[in-house]
Image (cartoon, rainbow, N blue to C red):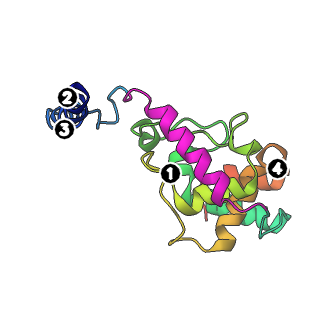
Amino acid sequence: MGILVGLLLVPVVAVVYVRSGSFPVATAAQAFPFEKTAAHMALAARISREAPTTAAVPATPDNMAEGARLYREQCAVCHGLRGGIPTAIARGMYPPPPELFKGKGVSDDPPGETYWKIANGIRPTGMPGFGKSLNETQMWQISQLLANSQQLTPAVNAQVMADASAK
């Protein structure tokens, strides 16, 4: 009888907790216990199952340059530029979007993993899925740019840093 009451009590307490307004839904709220751990575990499992293992677009200078242009237009508003300060949008996001050109992180991920993240997005981080707004080649070009961001040519690096309004 105690087990049955305990099993029924857990969902009731969960509903009361959520309906009380205590559940952390604001971007400034403390993270829910185990939220980051659960999200990282689920994301890693999904990516390992679904991410492409070979790049459909090579890391050529032309693809890298086009990836830089697309990154500036589509990604920099949240992820920023190399050495730049976070944008107002980035400062208001939870979790904060990673700075993709700073240190290790995406630059040591395989291009297929980055492609999966660009195509599908990451819920509930604010990272949108671009699978319906960019074509496959464009998503691969950005993926190759990020995977090779630690060894960009000066020309491509200048294109990443170019003012997006100077198109």
Residue closest to the eye, 2 or 39: 2
Is residue 62 shown in magenta? Answer: no
Look at the picture and state if 82 lies above or below 163.
Answer: above
Q: Earlier in the sequence, mark 4 or mark 2?
A: 2
Q: Earlier in the sequence, mark 1 or mark 2?
A: 2
* Contact between labelled residues 3 and 4, with CB atoms less than 8 Å apart: no
Amino acid carrying label 1: it is Ile
In the image, taking residue 109 as reference, residue 61 lies left or right, namely right
User: Depth-wise, is mark 4 or mark 1 nearer the camera?
Assistant: 1
User: Depth-wise, is mark 4 or mark 3 nearer the camera?
Assistant: 3
* Contact between labelled residues 2 and 4, with CB atoms less than 8 Å apart: no
* Contact between labelled residues 2 and 1, with CB atoms less than 8 Å apart: no
* Contact between labelled residues 3 and 1, with CB atoms less than 8 Å apart: no
Determine the CA span between mark 3 and mark 2.
22 Å
Q: Identify the image quadrant of residue 32.
A: top left
Find disc 1 in the rendering and name its residue: 122
| Helix, strand or loop at mark 1 | loop
Mark seen at residue 1: 2
Image coordinates of residue 4 in percent, x first then y, are 22, 33
Span shown in magenta? 31-53
* Contact between labelled residues 2 and 3, with CB atoms less than 8 Å apart: no
Mark seen at residue 15: 3
Determine the CA span between mark 4 and mark 3.
51 Å
User: Depth-wise, is mark 1 or mark 3 nearer the camera?
Assistant: 3
Is residue 47 shown in magenta? Answer: yes
Is residue 83 visible in the rendered structure shown here?
yes
Which residue is depicted at the point 65% across and 72% down? 136
